[in-house]
Amino acid sequence: MIDVLRASTTICAALAAGAEAIIPVAELEEALRLARQFERSTVLLAGERKGEKPEGFDLGNSPLEYTSEVVAGKRIIFTTTNGTQVLHRLRFAPSVLVAGFVNVSATATAIAAGASQYAELHLCCAGTTGMLALEDALAAGALIDRLQSLLPQLTLTDASRAVLWLYQYNADRLADIVRTTDHARRLQSLGFCDDIAFATQLDTFAIVPVMDQHIIRRIDKNNQEIER
Ligand code: 3SL
Ligand code: MG
C-alpha cells in the first residue's frame, strides 16, 4: 500500500521511532471505541480528517510529530482519509507492506527476499478520495525500478510499466514534482510544507511496515521482525 502524502510516510516514521504497532481503522468512531479497550496510557489515537488532527486525538498525520519521545513503546490507533481505508480493504490479503519514498529500497529488498512465496505483487496506490495521486504513482514507479534490478524475472503489467516510466522520466526532480501535486498544494495551504519535503526523501528508513491480523509492525529489509 502506497500513500506518500501522508499515511505511508507517517506509519514508517512512527515505527522507526519505536512505536510498538499501528492499528489502522477506517472510521473515527471505531478508533475511539478501540482506544477504550486498551489501558489508555499504552495507546495513542492518531490520524486526520481533512488533513487536521481530529478532536480528542493525541496526534495528527504529520510524520514529524512521531518522535521517539512521543511514540516509543506505544500502540497507535490510526485513521486517515485514504491510506487507512485502503489498509482496511486489504485486511484479508495474504501479505501487506506499507511503502513510500522514505523506505522504497528496504521495501524492494523485503519483497525480493519473500518473492518465492508469491505469484503476484499488487501495488495499491491510495490516491486521494478515489482519484489518482501523482506522488503515489511516482513512488510505485520507484519501487518497481528497484524491484526490476533485484528480480530480473519480474513481468510487468501495462499499468506497472506506465508508473515505472513516469518515475524514470522524473527521477531527478521528484521533490519538485511532488510539491506541485493536488494533495501537496492542499497540505501546503494547511501549513504542512515540511511534511512534503520529508515524504519525498528517498530511503530515510531501512524498515518495512507489515500488516498481519489487522496490525502493522515493522520488519527490517531482510524480512526479519525487529527485536525490541
Ligand atoms: O488520506 C490519508 O491517508 C492521509 O494521509 C491524507 S493527509 O495527507 O493527512 O491529508
Ligand atoms: Mg495521499
Image (cartoon, helix red, strand yellow):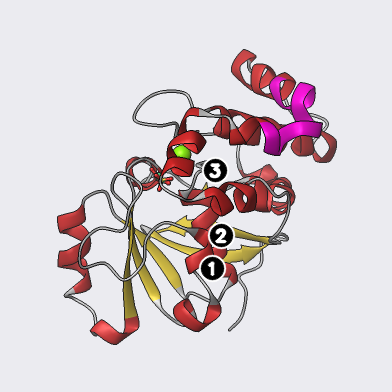
Q: Are marks 2 and 1 in contact (CB under 8 Å)?
A: yes
Q: Quadrant of residue 123?
A: top right
Rendered residue at 54%/29% (across/down): 181
Instruction: Give the CA distance from mark 3 to mark 1.
Output: 16 Å
Q: For ligand 1, tell me if the residue under mark 1 lies within 8 Å.
A: no
Task: Using a 10 Å C-alpha cutoff, classify the residue at mark 1 as few (fewer than 14 neighbours), some (14 to 19) or many (20 or more).
Answer: many
Instruction: Give the CA distance from mark 2 to mark 3.
Output: 10 Å
Q: Are marks 3 and 1 in contact (CB under 8 Å)?
A: no
- Residue designated by label 2: 12
Q: Is residue 132 above or below residue 114?
A: above
Q: Is residue 175 left or right of residue 135?
A: right
- Residue designated by label 1: 15
Q: Main secondary structure of the magenta part?
A: helix
Q: Are marks 2 and 3 in contact (CB under 8 Å)?
A: no
Q: Is residue 160 above or below residue 210?
A: above
| Residue 98 in sight | no
The numbered mark, 2 or 3, whose residue comes first in the sequence reads 3
Confirm whether the magenta stretch covers residue 86: no
- Looking at the rendering, the stretch of residues picked out in magenta corresponds to 166-176
Q: Quadrant of residue 218?
A: bottom right
- Residue designated by label 3: 4
Rendered residue at 83%/31% (across/down): 152
